[in-house]
Image (cartoon, rainbow, N blue to C red):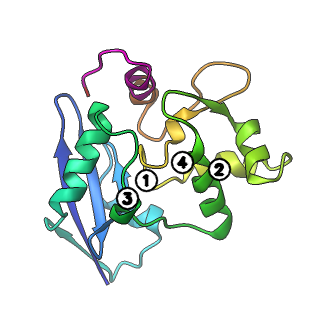
């Protein structure tokens, strides 16, 4: 098994894109490298990460998401990686409409366990597919933005873009 990676350079940021068998499995921010992807994907050290080889359709799709031209990446371009519970959480993330937010409590309820707020929050924090599984749309019920793996500034920019504000990533 091998993974391919490349960077999508935007105006002010770059994003690490990692694919396996031509499908996106990890999206990271400017400060994240292959080591973060390896850890989040739980790949053994013997698995190869090869620079280049990310399909053009994946690069174009991510560019579309990050510029607001696309609201959702076609499912054929990515693979969801995680435990069964994480996959249930990620499915519910993808159900949050573009331009809207939900609280961690609402997400836990959608997953089917209102008492699992902390487990849901942990799963959201382990989301390997930023923007595709829009964890930036999940906020604390007491207000504010909460946390985001690639920084609160990026989270705010993504929410602003979805609200129709002019944003440059």
Q: Which residues are magenta?
A: 157-168
Q: Residues within 10 Å of mark 2 (few under 14, many from 20)?
A: few
Q: Position of residue 127 (x, y in %)?
A: 51, 53
Whole-angstrom CA distance, mark 4 to mark 1, is 11 Å
Q: Is residue 161 highlighted in magenta? A: yes
Q: Is residue 12 highlighted in magenta? A: no
Q: Residues within 10 Å of mark 1 (few under 14, many from 20)?
A: many
Question: Is the C-beta separation of discs 1 and 3 under 8 Å?
Answer: yes
The quadrant of the image that shows the C terminus is top left
Which residue shows up at 49% across the image and 49% down it?
A: 133
Name the residue at the top extreme: 165
**Secondary structure of residue under mark 2:** helix
Q: Is residue 147 visible?
A: yes
Q: Which residue is mark 2?
A: 122
Choose mark 2 or mark 3, whichever is in front. Answer: 3
Whole-angstrom CA distance, mark 2 to mark 3, is 17 Å
Quarter residue 70 falls in: top left
Whole-angstrom CA distance, mark 1 to mark 2, is 15 Å
Q: Residues within 10 Å of mark 4 (few under 14, many from 20)?
A: some
Q: Which residue is mark 4?
A: 94
Image vertical order of residue 44 relative to residue 105, above or below: below
Which residue shows up at 42% across the image and 26% down it?
A: 162
Which residue shows up at 26% across the image and 71% down it?
A: 22
Q: Is residue 91 left or right of residue 85?
A: left
């Amino acid at each position: 098994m091998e993974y391919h990676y490349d960077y999508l350079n935007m105006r002010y940021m770059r994003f690490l894109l990692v694919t396996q068998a031509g499908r996106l499995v990890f999206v990271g921010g400017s400060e994240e490298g292959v080591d973060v992807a390896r850890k989040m994907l739980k790949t053994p050290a013997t698995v190869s990460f090869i620079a280049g080889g990310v399909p053009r359709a994946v690069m174009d799709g991510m560019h579309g998401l990050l510029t607001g031209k696309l609201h959702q990446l076609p499912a054929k371009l990515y693979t969801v990686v995680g435990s069964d519970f994480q996959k249930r959480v990620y499915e519910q993330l993808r159900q949050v409409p573009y331009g809207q937010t939900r609280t961690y409590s609402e997400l836990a309820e959608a997953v089917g366990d209102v008492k699992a707020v902390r487990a849901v929050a942990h799963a959201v924090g382990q989301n390997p597919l930023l923007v595709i599984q829009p964890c930036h749309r999940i906020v604390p019920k007491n207000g504010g933005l909460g946390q985001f793996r690639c920084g609160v500034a990026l989270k705010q920019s993504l929410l602003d873009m979805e609200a129709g504000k002019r944003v440059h990533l």
